[in-house]
Image (cartoon, grey):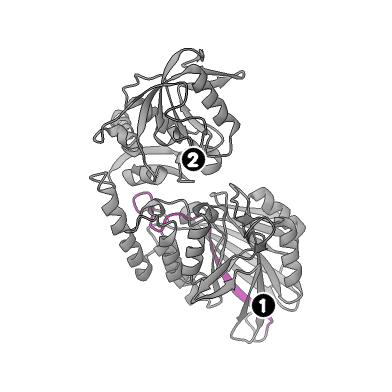
Amino acid sequence: MKYFSFLLLSLLLISCNKNDNKLEFIVLQINDVYEIDALEGGKTGGLARVEELHQQLLKENPNTLLVHAGDFLNPSLLGALKDENGDRYKGKQMVEVMNAMNFDLVALGNHEFDIGYSDLQKRFNESTFQWISTNAQLKKDSTSVIPFYVEKNGIKTNIPRTVTFDFNDKDGTKIKVGFISATINSNPQDFVDYGDLYQDAINAHTSLKNTTDVVLGLTHVSIAQDRLIANSLPEIPIIFGGHEHTNMMVPVNNSFIAKADANAKTAYVHRITFDKKSKKTIIKSELVEINEEIEKDIIVENIIKNWNILLDETLKVVLADPYEIIYHSNIPLDGRDTQIRSEQTNLGKIITASMSRVFNDEVDCAILNGGSIRIDDEIQGEITGVDIFRVLPFGGGINKVEMTGELLERTLQYGRLRAGTGAYLQRHNITYENKEWKIGGKPIIKNKIYKVVLTDYLLLGYDIPFLKSDVKGVVKIYKNEPQDTASDIRKVVIEYLKSMYLIEA
């Protein structure tokens, strides 16, 4: 465990006298959690362990809040599976688990909006925990913006811009704690009005500061944006943040910004003492590793087991042993959204190299749209087939396609100019040097026919509108048989990593 102790505003001596006007409360913080179960072969993370920690903290101090700083409905392997009606679960499993954990406050992350408004509303309605959304609101049309809401039994309850909690202790001290939030407009959706997150945060703080003892932040924005919020609102002693996926404790003047690791690999425990007389706040923050040393809460674990049964049944249609270790990586393989959609990553290189290998490298190059990689995380250590399904939850086949150099160059250039979106291309045997595209180190010849490996999806024209099977420039498409490994890109990657694992072993 890592320990951080911070003195905010002044050094105070904490006494246990009656009516000391001091009250301690605890905030247990997680953020960017996409998987309900433990990862790395069960060694790290897992929401059943987080709940066990939660229960321990409640025994220590009933004035304990469990909060989530956003990003949990998407992406995930379970969320990509379909129910008996053919509808994808899209975070339903996460809401069920979080309901059982009795979260006290949950902020909206940018990935919550990825599932579309209809499914997001379903998740709102299924939830029993308190949401907060200071800047992100529902855009009904070009002129009408209303709060998001939870609907139960025909009654709609707006998701508030601010939330307060009342605490009291044994000696009679009472305090009111307020929360504001902020949500980044990364990969913006048409049904969301993102407002002005800075001004909205300031306005929310103004509405709380005279009616609460202390105001805290629960945000899902970049660290740069969190810094700006902290600078704009120096009265906020700490912001519980998300989005970066890597733990950090960043000082900003007399305030701090705390973020835990993604997928509950760690959680932050903040023990906060507020002095009503001096109006001062002391915070002691502890970064707790969520690992095998922590027991699993039985109730939450049983819910997770039921979802895992469903997952196993689905995976075993494709893989005989989904949990077989297929590779060991000593370095993080980067599938984070920002990176995979804007630069070449080691994970992207592995996937596209495997696409070439399945055709015995008798091709010129391979390309994959970054939007196909949905894990938004790094994977390291023991890697199983399940991990590859998490990386590429939608699967789909890959094809060897003969196309002209002119079409190939146009496709590559389109992907480059769409950096930051799902149309950005991960590539194999392709470089861009001095404003020129090269295959195998040689400039593309426009009238030459190249053999390119790409996915079924890319040939549908969704990410790259002009790239379709019947477009001028596509000369030939080599069709796969259903039994071919190439019929599922996940099998392609798994077989490639297995072969590399054997060589390296």
The answer to whether any part of residue 407 appears in the image is yes
Q: Which mark is residue 371?
A: 2
Quadrant of the snapshot with the C terminus: top left
Image spot of residue 346 (x, y percent):
46, 33
The answer to whether any part of residue 253 appears in the image is no
Check disc 1 and report the residue beneath it.
176
Which one is in front in this view, the residue at disc 1 or the one at disc 2?
A: 2
Foreground: 387 or 439?
Answer: 439
Image spot of residue 99 (x, y percent):
45, 69
Tell me the kind of residue under disc 2. Answer: Gly
- In the rendered structure, which disc, 1 or 2, sits on the residue that comes first in sequence? 1
Residue found at x 69% / y 81%: 21
The quadrant where residue 481 appears: top left
Q: What secondary structure is found at the residue carrying circle 1?
A: strand
What kind of secondary structure does the magenta stretch mostly adopt? loop
Asked if residue 26 lies in the magenta stretch, the reply is yes
Image spot of residue 176 (x, y percent):
67, 77
Asked if residue 487 lies in the magenta stretch, the reply is no
How many numbered markers are drawn? 2
Asked if 379 appears above or below 480 in the picture, the reply is below
Tell me the kind of residue under disc 1. Answer: Lys
Residue found at x 73% / y 77%: 211
Q: Residues within 10 Å of mark 1 (few under 14, many from 20)?
A: some
The quadrant where residue 307 appears: bottom left
Q: What secondary structure is found at the residue carrying circle 2?
A: helix
Residue found at x 46% / y 21%: 473
Asked if 422 appears above or below 79 in the picture, the reply is above
Q: Residues within 10 Å of mark 2 (few under 14, many from 20)?
A: some
- Compute the Cα span from label 1 to label 2: 44 Å
Indicate left or right for 22 with 288 as reference: right
Question: Magenta region: which residues?
Answer: 20-42
